[in-house]
Amino acid sequence: MGTPLLELRGINKSFGPVQVLRDVAFTVQPGEVTALVGDNGAGKSTLVKCIGGIYPIDSGDYLIEGKQVSVHSPRDAAQLGVEIVYQDLALCDNLDIVQNMFLGRERRSGMILDEPTMEQLASETLASLSVRTVKSVRQQVSSLSGGQRQTVAIAKAVLWNSKLVILDEPTAALGVAQTAQVLELVRRLADNGLAVVLISHNMNDVFAVSDRIAALYLGRMAAQVKTTDVTHAQVVELITSGRSGALGLAEEGAAA
Amino acid sequence: MGTPLLELRGINKSFGPVQVLRDVAFTVQPGEVTALVGDNGAGKSTLVKCIGGIYPIDSGDYLIEGKQVSVHSPRDAAQLGVEIVYQDLALCDNLDIVQNMFLGRERRSGMILDEPTMEQLASETLASLSVRTVKSVRQQVSSLSGGQRQTVAIAKAVLWNSKLVILDEPTAALGVAQTAQVLELVRRLADNGLAVVLISHNMNDVFAVSDRIAALYLGRMAAQVKTTDVTHAQVVELITSGRSGALGLAEEGAAA
Amino acid sequence: EDTTDPGAAKTPKIGVILPDSKSSARWETADRKYLEEAFKAAGVQYDIQNAQGDKTQFQSIADQMITGGVTVLVIVNLDSGTGKAVLDKAKAQGIPTIDYDRLTLGGGAEYYVSFDNVAVGRLQGEGLVKCLTEKGVKNPNIAQLNGSPTDNNATLFKEGGVSVLKPKYDANEYKLVDDQAVPDWDNAQGGVIFQQMLTKANGKIDGVLAANDGLGNAAISVLKTNKLNGKVPVTGQDATVQGLQNILVGDQCMTVYKAVKKEATATAELAIALAKGEKKQVSQTTKDSESGKDVPSVLLEPQAIYFNNVKDVVTDGYVTKDELCTADFAAKCTEAGIS
Amino acid sequence: MSAVTKEPATAVAPQAARDEGILGYLRGYGQKVRGGDMGALPAVLGLLVLCVVFGLARPVFLTAPNFANLLTQAGPVVVIAMGLVFVLLLGEIDLSAGYTSGVCAAVLAIMLTTHGYPWYVGVAAALATGLVIGLLLGFLVAKVGIPSFVVTLAAFLGFQGTVLWLLDEGTNISVRDSVIISLENEYLSPAVGWGLAAVTVLGFAAVQLIQQRNRRRRGLKADLWQVVAFRVIGLAVLVGFAVAILNQERSRNPLFSLKGVPIIVPVVGVLLLLWTFVLRRTAYGRHIYAVGGNKEAARRAGIAVDRIRISAFVICSSMAAVGGVLLASQARSVDPNTGGSNVLLYAVAAAVIGGTSLFGGKGRVLDAVLGGLVITMIINGMGLVGWSSAYKYIATGVVLLLAASVDAFSRRRAAASS
Amino acid sequence: MSAVTKEPATAVAPQAARDEGILGYLRGYGQKVRGGDMGALPAVLGLLVLCVVFGLARPVFLTAPNFANLLTQAGPVVVIAMGLVFVLLLGEIDLSAGYTSGVCAAVLAIMLTTHGYPWYVGVAAALATGLVIGLLLGFLVAKVGIPSFVVTLAAFLGFQGTVLWLLDEGTNISVRDSVIISLENEYLSPAVGWGLAAVTVLGFAAVQLIQQRNRRRRGLKADLWQVVAFRVIGLAVLVGFAVAILNQERSRNPLFSLKGVPIIVPVVGVLLLLWTFVLRRTAYGRHIYAVGGNKEAARRAGIAVDRIRISAFVICSSMAAVGGVLLASQARSVDPNTGGSNVLLYAVAAAVIGGTSLFGGKGRVLDAVLGGLVITMIINGMGLVGWSSAYKYIATGVVLLLAASVDAFSRRRAAASS
Ligand SMILES: Nc1ncnc2c1ncn2[C@@H]1O[C@H](COP(=O)(O)OP(=O)(O)OP(=O)(O)O)[C@@H](O)[C@H]1O
Ligand SMILES: Nc1ncnc2c1ncn2[C@@H]1O[C@H](COP(=O)(O)OP(=O)(O)OP(=O)(O)O)[C@@H](O)[C@H]1O
Ligand SMILES: [Mg+2]
Ligand SMILES: [Mg+2]
């Protein structure tokens, strides 16, 4: 499929004495939804934070569109066109919905913030995500429900022209209708040519929207396969034991 | 089925100008799992926080085992045998897993904390919840993954002899195996005679373990029915529009 | 409210601003008392305030006194700048002023009433020399424990003291081993500083020029721990009960007594006269180094107090016998002839 | 712009204007206040209570001359507090702000008096000193990572020494430059005062109208015209009343007239406008709040957190420099105690009483002004009561506590209903 | 106990002892330090650096007499800082702790000198005063809801006045009671010093052994015996070395002997043990950390948050009272400056340099001791360098900054790897 948009090779990451990622390889193609799955504590969020520049990588290669890059901060990642919704949603509780959604990319006219434009755009985006219970986009995010917060974070990430959108368990707190909207949105982003990474524990969702599945097991990449090549049960096996038949880590690798 | 363990009548709750709960009635029977469902922002978590004494109720009756009680703080709720896992998991990031799990109910021998006992119990409980990636129960919870945090919160709540256990979206961040364990645990708690309230957006889970379903719609209780009396589709309709055929809010009520 | 009406400001009312309550106990315990007594006796209205060492407060108090219709303003400035600002404001409003205890350079007050601060320092220096001579110490090592580095008076005290000791240092009769200022006149810090002086000099300090009784007591406290108290003369100032007691038991060499009552009474007399629109003649003048003018002055002489004239302070009523001669000191009091 | 917003909005914007009419607006405001969102109300209430108490105790407190005193006395504290708001908004503290103003005042005095430069050179030097100090503090906090409490405590000691050193171990330097002196000691002519009042009110009205028009154009909910009119008229009454009082004759010397708005008032007014504009209408201000609310979230949003932190210290120290100039003007001299004693505590207290949180993310520049007035009023009022030092200290503490508890009660109410 | 724990554990406990042997342990420690979890290391490093610097500048700094000075000088700051740790652990501050110690010292002096009561009555009165003050502050913070910064700032002013009032507007009261004086001015006889050292080391060894045995019994991972032995021997060497130095003759007066461990050392030692025990081994201590880490989580866990907050202020003020007794003992006199000036700042700095966070949830009582020694060492060393005040202030600031940056660098490392 040509050069991948994002390619990671041999990524290692430790926290003090604890090695969380070992020699992880990961590729993401533009126009595709790549599902990243793995058990709790497998290292998915850590991998995403390494991609986003939140954590420095101990060693390994980070390539965007085939070019080696070094990402030291979220600013670097954003400049490379990487947009991420983190699992531990980072919202400023003291700001309102509009202010959070445009944080770091405020619309301006001259020096002055263009509040009306931002307010209007925020309303429209939220409405398109099936959020109906938010009373006002001028509400502080501290007063939002779990699902509403998650929606704000998602809306924030998709408002921008980016090349790669990574969503870490975006639908965890969402209702039925909202989940459907987000999955549809994910598909639409990929169809528009963006690369999308979706982390989820919900196999139905994964199989519904993804083109490829990457499975992490205890900090190692067990396998990265086409969704159409595997079954539900195989993926669950990969997640829980790191291998499934021919797929997955070698015996001794899994034991390490 | 005799006196309900928990009965709420006519509960109202506003935040400043925003009325979040309107005239809500809710009953929970011992030995049953009651699923509380509703759209994002419907007021589920707010209702749970009112039960737990986090928020004061504006008006309404709160009965435990048929007796009117007044709950002003989480201490009051705990003394009545109500144990809650909140959606916005409240863990002390500066404490380790054991310390968090026993917070407020430390084991002591004499005046001195009985650390070995607590450490042992914590390890056993976590193991029974299929958590395999936690390196040490002496790890600070700030270093845990999303799912690991959630498991700690659940383990904390079920460690105690309580009469009513309320779990607000407990499986949102959990992996496949862990979710199965928690659902099994929920069922087992109910079978042991406890009353359990489970909040979830996942209809499969709801139908798998619950005896009754209560649906909130825009802060009103749309319906509380036996799980066996309704279908998947009906519940989704209740959630999204507040009514489904004969069930649910009257037309004008839904419009209010 | 009529006080704000320019025409009605006829009833004499005297405003006094004291500087603080921490550099010395005298302001609140002595000056306020004596001034009040004098004003009451003369039947004039008065308003005595303390700026608590805060310049902003000093100025707000002045503003308010001017606003509140005082007819004479008496100030003890915190520094010449603020003092001058206040005197200028008062003058613009036609209010005569008196510099009390501290001269405001360039301020142009009507009178200046004070003890000579350099003379205070000189008495301390002379006292130290006297005590060292009496003890027969040859080539003594001297430590100087000065007052707050931000207090101009401390500079004057030091100037006076050094004027006596400098020739001895130069002649190698005495040796200056340490010289440090104590921030905020803080006795606790003074104690630590002296402890370090003593350590640094390896215990070889034979005389301490301490700027006031509080600092003197701090030094004595350290000497006591090293069982050197009584052997090393220490100076002081203010004739506090504590200082006098230290003198009685022989731990302190001397203190400087400023008869605050005289100063207060003299000031009150001048102020009352000014309030009545009279201008009294005084004999002395002080040269204002900034404006070059001679300010009419009443300059009082401070008195050095040693063991044998402690009784003068009691006789003066500055401290009472009850305060001074508690059980521990009764015998010494008798010895010193205090009855 | 993005894949999503290109789609036509499928639902109406969530916020529907439900409360119609002026009554609905008032009801909404009442609910907001009862819900604890009181804005400037506690500080204003505090001011009123203090006026009544001190006014009863000492009628002279409520006279025109004392009102003018109050405003000039508040100047330095308010200005230093304004700068502190920026640092507090980040959840940091600057313990050295007081002595920073002292250092800058000393620089000013040395330039003016010792070297005889014109006032603008002196002020420029003072501001430059403040800027460098801010850069240094910010660098140590943001880049080296030492907690701001420790950095600024060290600076507190260091600058105390620096002032002493600049002033040659304790001399004091007179400031005689008429421009500098005028800042805290001169008054606008009555006509200029009225002109300024008019400009203020008209400017405010214009800004309000433009904002509301912009919102209406976009189809966003705008305020009722009655409400806008009420705000404008309210401001007009307040400003007009103040100017009228200040334009009364205050001199007790028949040969000499003393009236008008103190020059410090427009100076503080301009600073208030400037910083309020920066905090509320620019991206930079937004980022300050974001960093204070959740540093990690701000970082993830691509905000250069370190730069924001450094800049806040620079603003704080520069405002302290301005405060230092005012202190020099007020005292007409600079000495080693300038900026010391309680200057810092009063400034922090001003910001906090106004409603700025010490934990970051919440606060306005206006808080510093209102809180500074509260603090100054306490000091001013205490100066009128002829108590001894001991009682005055105690009473000041108690009054401060009472003023703060107005705020605390409002916030408790807020906490109870959320 | 519950439905879950009744089930037999289906998996092994997660923490498997993977690093075997003494080498593994050392490797683990190295990784921990490199990972930024340095414990007391920064403060200890800071102490060593200061020793070297001052020792080179003034050799007398490293002599036995100065070591004894250092310990007695550190007493009050360390004790007040210990109390502050409790308040800081909650993320609160007590600006009034310094003057609280002043008020309590004044009460002590009045009881002893003015009224002639025996020392224990005086101490009891001082402690009772501290307790009441703590209750008052805690009540205002926890129940009324005024931010602790404002409450204790008001108290700072109020208590300043109270000291003045108690001391009749500024007189000094001498303290002559020999028991009180002995606290900061007398020494244990050499034999008693050695006895105490032995008890300390043996006690420590016993506690360590019992703990490890308890863990082994439960099948939990325990430390290697080599490590335990190393700790015990390390302590023994340290304590023995200190006692040996302090038992040297220090007198400059040939007629009279001056040697032994200062009495303040065992006093501080007992307080350190007591509060460390409370914080680390009791449920109450656990709750302090919990409230400081996440107040809401603590509340939800059923902890009586208000009571915890009040109690922390009570402990802080009571320790300030003890500090006040020590201040009175040190100066043999109480005056209106007692507890004022920089006492509070030094105490807070001591806690913070030791590693206690100002944002709550992190800190130990030992921090106060180590940090207090750092601060005192700076002041002590500065006292030996005969600079003018200006340079001393500046140098103190710079040294404080350097001491703090040892800590900052270690923490930056921690942040970078997590
Ligand atoms: N700062 C940290 N310090 C130490 N260990 C950490 C830290 N952050 C994460 N870990 C550990 O790294 C492992 C991977 O965590 P991560 O959050 O990446 O898991 P995850 O795959 O996202 O899990 P989940 O599905 O539960 O979100 C976990 O075992 C966690 O305890
Ligand atoms: N403190 C508050 N102030 C104002 N509004 C609030 C506050 N807390 C919650 N709300 C509002 O109340 C409504 C219900 O919130 P709640 O958290 O109970 O929803 P929920 O049913 O739990 O939703 P979710 O499924 O997303 O968790 C939301 O619209 C929310 O914005
Ligand atoms: Mg994760
Ligand atoms: Mg919820």
Image (cartoon, coloured by chain):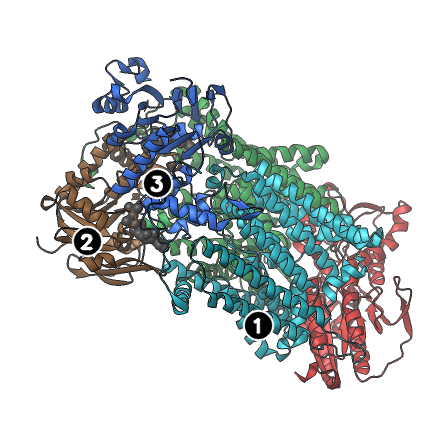
Chain colours: A blue, B brown, C red, D cyan, E green
Q: What residue is shown at x 71% (from left), y 76% (from top)?
A: D250
Q: Mark 3 points at which residue?
A: B99
Toward the viewer: E66 or C121?
Answer: C121
Q: Mark 2 points at which residue?
A: B222
**Picture residue at 69% right of the left edge, 54% below the top:** D322
Quadrant of the rendered structure where residue E401 is?
Answer: top right
Write down the quadrant of residue C151 in the picture: bottom right
Residue A90 image position (x, y, % from top left): 42, 41
Residue placed under numbered mark 1 in the picture: D237
Q: In this view, does A98 lie to the left or right of B104?
A: right
Q: In which quarter of the image is ligand 1?
A: top left
Q: Which amino acid does label 1 sit on?
A: Val
* Same-chain check, marks 3 and 1: no
| Numbered badge on residue E68 | none
Disc 3 on helix, strand or loop? helix
Q: In this view, does C286 lie above or below E208?
A: below
Kind of element beneath mark 2: strand
